[in-house]
């Protein structure tokens, strides 16, 4: 579709790919290599707590965007999903960096109707059984996510569920709260409540942690809304 087609209304901060002209001419986020947890140049204290919003981008896809007044307002992640031909009703989800399906793969999951064969993958790491990473059907006050025991950059996340939202603590069930996920409330006549949001403190926005927060939050939401 032509970029001049006025019938297509993109969400705030939307852009087609990492090669497009940035909306903010001072920003070169898309061309920067994401820093690692151990990178001494990353100063979490310099990153303000931020609320990101999930917004529709195209059929079967949405983007996670920061506030419009953020230093770089472009989408952080592009999330798409498709139905498995051989298992109608089963949805396979991919998360990519940036604002389009052309971005680098962050992760993907295939829940297979939440069977024991459900799988999840982070980046180019080996695919793993979901129950070994995130046993969401386990009863209790919280659900633990830990993708890799070999990778020191892989966070251990504890998601606690409340009435209308979930909070995530890092490292232990009594660790630092780094995230709050709020799902849409369609029962209220308030459009600001009819969107899903993810609020992260400075630590939650460190790239490796951010990636796995988004993946685990999306899997939690699929679990919450399944029939």
Image (spheres, grey):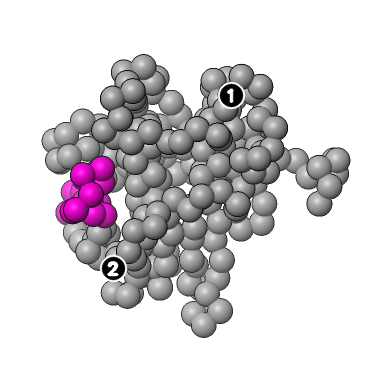
Give the quarter of the image for residue 180.
Answer: top left
Magenta stretch: includes residue 149: yes
Q: Nearer the viewer, residue 71 or 175?
A: 71
State the predominant SS element of the stretch in magenta: loop
Identify whether 135 is placed above or below 193. below
Q: Between tags 1 and 2, which lies in front?
A: 1
Q: Position of residue 202 (x, y in %)?
A: 34, 25
What mark, if any, has residue 129 been given in the picture?
Answer: 2
Pick the front one: 120 or 186: 120
| Mark 1 and mark 2 residues within 8 Å of each other at the beta carbon | no
- Mark 2: secondary structure: strand
Q: Which residue in the rendered view is the most extreme toward the top?
A: 46
Residue 30 visible in the displayed image: yes
Quarter of the image with the C terminus in it: bottom left
- How far is mark 1 from mark 2, CA to CA? 38 Å
Asked if the magenta segment contains residue 60, the reply would be: no
Q: Residues within 10 Å of mark 2 (few under 14, many from 20)?
A: some
Q: Is residue 40 left or right of residue 195?
A: left
Q: Residue at x 25, y 59 (%)?
A: 133
Q: Which residues are magenta?
A: 140-157
Q: What's the residue at 41%, 62% (across, down)? A: 109
Read off the residue under disc 1.
27
At x 34%, y 25%, the residue is: 42
Q: Is residue 179 visible?
A: no
Percent x, y of residue 171: 17, 39
């Amino acid at each position: 579709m032509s970029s001049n087609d006025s019938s297509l209304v993109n969400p705030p901060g939307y852009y087609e790919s990492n090669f497009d002209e940035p909306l903010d001419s001072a920003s070169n986020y898309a061309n920067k290599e994401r820093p690692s947890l151990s990178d001494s140049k990353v100063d979490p204290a310099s990153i303000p707590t931020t609320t990101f919003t999930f917004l529709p981008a195209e059929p079967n896809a949405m983007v996670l965007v920061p506030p419009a007044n953020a230093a770089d307002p472009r989408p952080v992640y592009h999330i798409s999903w498709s139905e498995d031909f051989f298992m109608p009703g089963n949805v396979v989800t991919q998360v990519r960096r940036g604002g389009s399906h052309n971005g680098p793969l962050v992760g993907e999951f295939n829940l297979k109707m939440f069977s024991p064969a459900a799988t999840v993958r982070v980046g180019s790491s080996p695919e793993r059984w979901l129950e070994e990473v995130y046993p969401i059907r386990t009863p209790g006050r919280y659900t633990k996510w830990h993708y890799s025991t070999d990778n020191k950059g892989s966070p251990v996340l504890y998601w606690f569920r409340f009435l209308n939202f979930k909070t995530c603590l890092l490292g232990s069930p009594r660790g630092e709260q780094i995230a709050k996920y709020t799902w849409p409330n369609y029962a209220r006549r308030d459009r600001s409540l009819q969107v899903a949001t993810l609020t992260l403190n400075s630590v939650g926005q460190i790239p490796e942690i951010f990636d796995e927060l988004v993946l685990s939050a999306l899997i939690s939401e699929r679990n919450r809304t399944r029939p």
